[in-house]
Structures are given as C-alpha cells and as structure tokens.
Amino acid sequence: MNVYINGIGCISPQSSTDGGLFSGDIKTYEGEFLQCIDPDYKLYIPPTMARRAGRIIKMGAAAARICLHDADLAMPGAIITGTGMGCIEDTENFLTEIILNDEKMLAPTAFIQSTHNTAAAQIAILLGCNNYNMTYVHRGFSFESALVDSMMQVDQGESENILTGGLDEMTPGMFAISRRLGIFRNSCSGHSALFTKKASGSIAGEGAAFFLLDGQQTSSSYCRLEAVEMLYKPDDEKEITGKILKLLKDHSLRIEDIDLVISGVNGDERFDGIYSSVLAPFKNCRLAYYKHLCGEYHTSSAFAVWLAAMILKKNQVPSFLLAHGDISTPPANVLIYNHYLGSNHTFILLRKC
Amino acid sequence: MPGRVFITGIGIISAIGDNVAETLTSLIIGKSGIGKNTHIESQYKEIFPVGEVNKGDHELAGVLGINDIREYTRTSLLGMIAAKEALSDAGLTDISKAGTGLISATSVGGMHRSEMFYKDFLNNHSKGRLMNIIHHECGDSTEKIADILGVKDFVSTVSTACSSSANSIMAGARLIKNGKLQRVIAGGTDSLTLFTINGFNSLMILDKNKCRPFDDTRSGLNLGEGAGFVVLESEEMVIKSGKKPYCELKGYGNACDAYHQTASSPEGNGAYLAMKKALDMSSLKESDIDYINVHGTGTQNNDLSEGKAMLRLFNGKVPPFSSTKAYTGHTLGASGGIEAVISVLAMKENILFPGLHFTTPIKELGMIPVITVQTNCKVNHVLSNSFGFGGNNSSLIFSQS
C-alpha cells in the first residue's frame, strides 16, 4: 500500500505552527492542563467563524488549512476526521442553556455546532468541498479509524488524496469530570515531571493535527504511512506484542529495523506498565515519549504522527522527546504505540521515503 | 473495486416493534409508533409527539438478561438488542473463526444519562453521579455491543449526525471489499434525549402533530429512538456457508453539501451527488431502481431539496418512494441502520411500504409517495437516503442477489 504524507498542519500546546518546537522552543506548563496555543485564526478562517465557532472547530479548520497550504493543494479528494469527544464546549453550552433557561427560548447555535462532525463539515464548507466527508468517534481508536479509512480509499483509488485529521478539545468541565474519574492527576507538578513522578492519572491535553495523505510521492513528501492497526481489549500483553510482531512481519521488517519507537507513556502508574512489557522486545531501539508535550487526549496519536513526520523529514530525533538511546543517527522506520486506558491499543508504522 | 458485499442478517428495534417480525407487521398494517413521550422529563412532553421504544430501560435490560443497568445506557441497550438479533438472524454463533468487525454509529451516545449528571454538576463541579457521565462518549455503546457479541477484530464508531449509520454500513463494506475483514456488523443506535428534543425545537423543526413527509403541509419532524443493524459478509463467506443472503449492498456514496451546517442547499446538491455516486458504483441505470426509502424527515427544507435532487437524478421519472419516518420518527444516528433494515424487508417481501399522513403533494415538486401498501411488487433494487447536519449526505443501494 503506497500512502504518503504530503502535507501537515498541527495546532497543539507547543509551537507547532511556526517551527518553534523543532528549533528548541519548548513550552513548559505548570498548570493543570496543556492548552493549545491559538494561532492568529484570522489568517486561516473567515472572521465570522473565528468569532462564533467553538475552539475545536477553529483549531481543526486552521490545522486543515495549514496542512493544505503545506501540500500546495486546494481541494482534497475527501475529508476524514477522528475525534474522541467532539465539540465538548458547544455540547456543554447547550446543556447549560437547557438547564438555566428551563428549556425555553434557546438559541440553536450551540446545538448546531455540537455534532461530532462539525469540524469536518465546516472545513468542507470553507473549501467548498463536496467530496466524501466522514467522522469517526471511538475513544482511542478515533484518529486511527480515520487513517484506516483514508488508506483504504487511497489504496483502492477511490480518492487520490485525503485530508485526514485527529482533533479533541479540553474544557474546564470535562477536565473536572475526567479528574474525578481518575484519568487526570489530582495535583500536577508540571509536565516535565510526568515521567519521573509516577502517579495515578495523567495530565490533560488537546490538539488538532491534519495530514494530506496521497497515493503519489512528491519531492516534498514527509514520509510513507506504512500501516495502521488497532487492537481492542487484548487478553494480555503477550497478545499486544504478538500484534506488533505480526505487523512488522507483514511489512517485511525485523525488530532491529525499527529505529525509533514513540510510546504513548503518560505517567499513569496504573497503565504505563503495559508499555514497558509490550515493548520489551524493542529494548535496543530508541524509545521516545510525546505526551509531556501535548498532554493526554483521545486523539493524541495524531500529534505523535505529526512528530514522526517531522522527524523523518528533518532526519533528526530531537532531544525534547526525552528519547532513550543515541539520538545522533536519523531514523528510517518509526513505530508509534499508544493505548487508551488499556483497552484501545493502536500501532502506526511510518517509513522514510 | 473488487469484492462483493452481501447482507446476511438484520436486526431492528424502534417505536414500531422490538424486532424484525414486529416491525414488518407494523409496516404492513400502517401502524405508526409516534405518540406521547413517556420517559424523557421535558417541558415539551405533552407538546411534541415522539417515536418511543415501547419498553423501559429495565425491560430492555431484561430482554438481554442484564440485571444491573447502571453500566448500560438506553442507547447501549437498544444497540445490543438490534445487533444481537442481526447476528443470530445471520445464523452466526461463533464469529471468532473469520475476521469480524463492528462499526456502530450514534449521534449523541450516552447523552440521556449525561443530562441527569449535568443538572447537579452545573453549579458544583464536585457534584453529579459519575455513573451517569462515564457513558457519555460515543464509543461506549459500541464497546457494550462489541462485548456482548464477542467482536474483537475491529471495533469503531461513526458520528456524522443523521447520516451516521448509513456511513457505518459504508465503512463496514469498504473494510470487506479491501479484504481487511470477512464480516462486519454495521448500523447504529440512538435514544431520545432532552438534548435533541431541545436542539431540534430550538431550530423550530419539530412538528406538534404526526410528521407528514413530502406533504405540502409538512411542518417538521418527530424525533424517535431505536437501533438498526445489518450483518455484512464477503462473497467468500457467503459461498463458504452456503446460506442465502438477503441481498447485495451494490452501491454506496457519500457527499458533502458544503452549503450550511444545518440547512440543505436549495437544489439538494449534496443529496444528488450522494445518490449519483451510489448509482455509479452499482452500475445500475436510474430506471433499475424500484423503490427509494427517502430521508424524508418532514421538514420544509429537507423534503424540498431531497425531492429536487431526486427529480434531477431520475430526470423527472422518480421511482416509487416513501419515508418511513412517519412510523419510527427520526431516529437520528440510528436512522440509516433502521432504514437499511426496512429497505431489505421491502426487497425480501416484495412490498412497498407507504408514507403515512400524506394528502397534498409539495407544490414545487408535485411528487406523490407510495400511500398505500403495495404487495406483490418486484422489488429488485432499493435506494436508501440518509442526510445529516454538516451537509453529510449518504445513499446506499441494495440489490436482490
């Protein structure tokens, strides 16, 4: 299957729109959650949208625009998004209105924008794109489902290229709920201590990352998107490792061919053990982390793919990934392994092109 | 694209029946499920009629042999019942031998329970029973369905508003055509919520009477709830098992209207493109289509633009059509699955189901739906439309196999 990443756009808690992060400008956070750095939205979306739309819609639309500009493409063959929680801010706003106004005289705006496919639809409206438009919303599989659909369509020639993105927003309300549920830590001593100070729960994050996936390689392609696999509620860690080894075999790769593993370790002591045992056969590979940069959210693997694409194009493993092992040689094959609360496991394989 | 995809099992629950047999009976005798809202506590309980499933949560759980319902939202229970029926209808007891996936769809997931939580949570973030919010995510009902069916190989959820479950069927078919899976249970589930009742009311598109799709006097939709699932199988699986499938999923298409977040373009451009794509994929001619199960919500905007798109695609010669939303209500993320099951039934029984409450054609269109039940028709090819917010338009074509 030949699928190339020919354009990228990423809004994140790091300087990911202006090249800052890869020049060493690491944003540090001491607060409770890592919030996206808003670009000047007026550069990417109409002023009315910048004023009225919810954050996730703006983040998504801007990331999509940056990605298409990067790929030098006006009209993608399809738009496919993945989002775990969708438009939480608008959902909360409408719920609040229902309760406070006792169901009377409600303005429809929040409801209209609350559906999970709003960002994908708004991007289509911005571009005037009548092509296939799809949104997957399955916890830690959301972005990966979007990738699988995209890869099949490119591979079968249903679409020459596809604008595919993963996006989620965090709100104070959702943060409060998630913390009560134990997903996030009760006290946070900053993102830099995420891996050293193990605790129950991770830190919250958010982001929107878009990719232009294309069946044709160009001189500016970032990398090849080789494979995406998902594993639902595996019986044990052996099954997960088995899935990875089979994935490598299916793509004629040996363990030692993987020269960078980006792991979704998030500092949650209840679940981080899974990473170390599953990745045990990769003990000689360079191992990198990413969630100290973007926080934990359902589609954080989209940020990891953005990092991997940058790494494969720039031929360097930046030190901010806190990688174990020698970072001086450029990688050729990158494996991203992430899981969501131990039940949704995903594997993304990217190769230099 | 290589590979054919067949439908080998169907399952459904809605206001007109708890299973396929009851649904078929209601459709034939023209029995609508629209009536008084009994389980959603709303100011509009007496004002807007809804298509409610006839069982309470405990009764639904009872059907599934579940005692403790705290873990299961109504959305999950409805989905589990319909998906289980589809799987058993396909005669499948052990699904572990061939790659099997589940793609479910929902528009608001566990919202019905989130609303209960939010009332307490709003003023104090340390309040609200967490048991009522942990099922909010759309993936929750899908995983409940996957677990009761024992699906492990591929599990995902689609949410594109009211076209959600037509898209989950499309996504399932693509996985089979690409050889990733041999079998996919696909469809969707949604329960009534305070959120959607108020949402559609804020858009002023809820009818205080029973909805009248494609009627000139139509004045909005009735919300409904339920679930509909189909079992999709590869040609290889069908040959291997020797069973006779209901039909083939011969074509599908999705297009974006790219016009407005909630309103359809006046000419129904997205609707036209979706139907055209499905037709092109099926290699059928327009005149081959024997029946269209239209989206037909009963709103001014939808029916007019959908009708215009149909007139354009069929060059004025529109095949028999009807909306079955006057029976079930608009079941949002479940409607594509529910109407896929109804389309399959039309083909299996060679019956055209009538649209209810129709008296006067829409002036601009002059189109008359099927208004009495038509038996002994030859129904070889059925087109089913599902259109959603964001201009998300999807069409499926089912053909006798």
Image (tube, coloured by chain):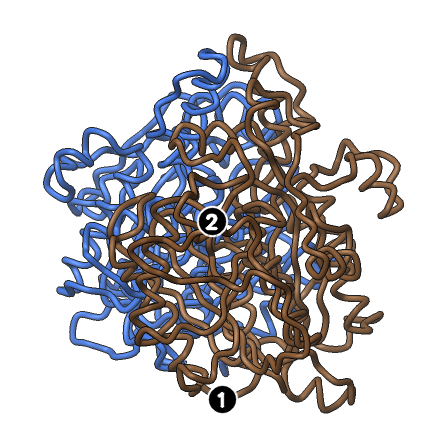
Chain colours: A blue, B brown
Three-letter amino acid code of the residue under disc 2: Thr
* Chain of the residue displaying label 1: B
Residue at screen point 58% across, 24% down: B115
Residue at screen point 21% across, 56% down: A67
Q: How far apart are marks 2 and 1 (CA)?
A: 35 Å
Q: In this view, does B155 lie above or below B191?
A: below
Q: Which quarter of the image is occupied by the C terminus of chain B?
A: bottom right
> Callout 1: few (<14), some (14-19), or many (20+) C-alpha neighbours within 10 Å?
few
Q: Is residue A104 left or right of residue B370?
A: left
Farthest front residue in view: B359
Farthest top residue in view: B123
Residue A287 shows up from this direction: no
Quadrant in which residue B398 is drawn: bottom right
Residue at screen point 81% across, 66% down: B88
* Mark 1, residue position: B2
> Callout 2: few (<14), some (14-19), or many (20+) C-alpha neighbours within 10 Å?
many
Q: B371 or A196: nearer the eye?
A: B371
Three-letter amino acid code of the residue under disc 1: Pro
Q: Which of marks 2 and 1 is nearer the N terminus?
A: 1
Quadrant in which residue B67 is drawn: top right
* Mark 2, residue position: B297
Residue A53 spot, x, y in % from top left: 27, 33
Q: What element carries label 1?
A: loop
